[in-house]
Amino acid sequence: MSKTITWEEIAPQTFIFDSKGQWVRNWFSNMVQEVVTIDDIEWNSVENYYQAMKSMDGDTQMLFPNLTPSGAKSMGRKVIIRPDWDEHRVAVMRKALRSNPLFFNLIPKHHVYTFMQKL
């Protein structure tokens, strides 16, 4: 006999809401405006943090936390990119994803741990 699946079991996996109760259509996007705290700084999105880390200048980095995600992406195209960016960008994104509550609250923990490991 198969088990009956209830709405309560399906809904959390089907409909994702941010901390303000707004439906998130593409919850895995870096452009979702969901505050993430990284190194004791609140960033408006994963994209904000990622774009800020392209610069090595602390003052430039601090221009990014409160921008919209699209504003951060636009500004990220204008900063002087650190010379070692290609070597660090994957680690920066991993750090950002690990701090994203939408990412960690939805995906089963064993998938997250597998995703974060080099297989």
Image (cartoon, rainbow, N blue to C red):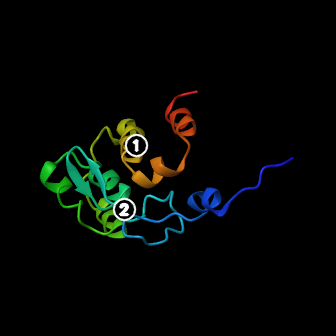
| Residue wearing tag 1 | 98
User: Is 87 situated above or below 62?
Assistant: above
- Pick whichever of labels 2 and 1 is earlier in the sequence: 2
Q: Nearer the viewer, residue 12 or 88?
A: 12
Instruction: Tell me the CA gap for discs 2 and 1.
Output: 13 Å
Residue 26 locus on image (x, y percent): 53, 64
Q: Nearer the viewer, residue 42 or 80?
A: 42
The residue sitting at 12% across, 54% down in the picture is 59
Q: Nearer the viewer, residue 5 or 90?
A: 5
Residue 38 locus on image (x, y percent): 27, 46
Q: Nearer the viewer, residue 6 or 90?
A: 6
Quadrant location, the C terminus = top right
Q: Secondary structure at mark 2?
A: loop
Q: Amino acid at mark 2?
A: Glu
Outermost residue to the bottom? 22
Outermost residue to the top? 119
Residue 108 locus on image (x, y percent): 56, 43
Which quarter of the picture shows residue 42? Answer: bottom left
Q: Any mark on residue 34, and which?
A: 2
Q: Callout 2: few (<14), some (14-19), or many (20+) C-alpha neighbours within 10 Å?
A: many
Q: Any mark on residue 113, and which?
A: none
User: Is 15 situated above or below 5?
Assistant: below
Residue 55 locus on image (x, y percent): 24, 49
The residue sitting at 35% across, 63% down in the picture is 73
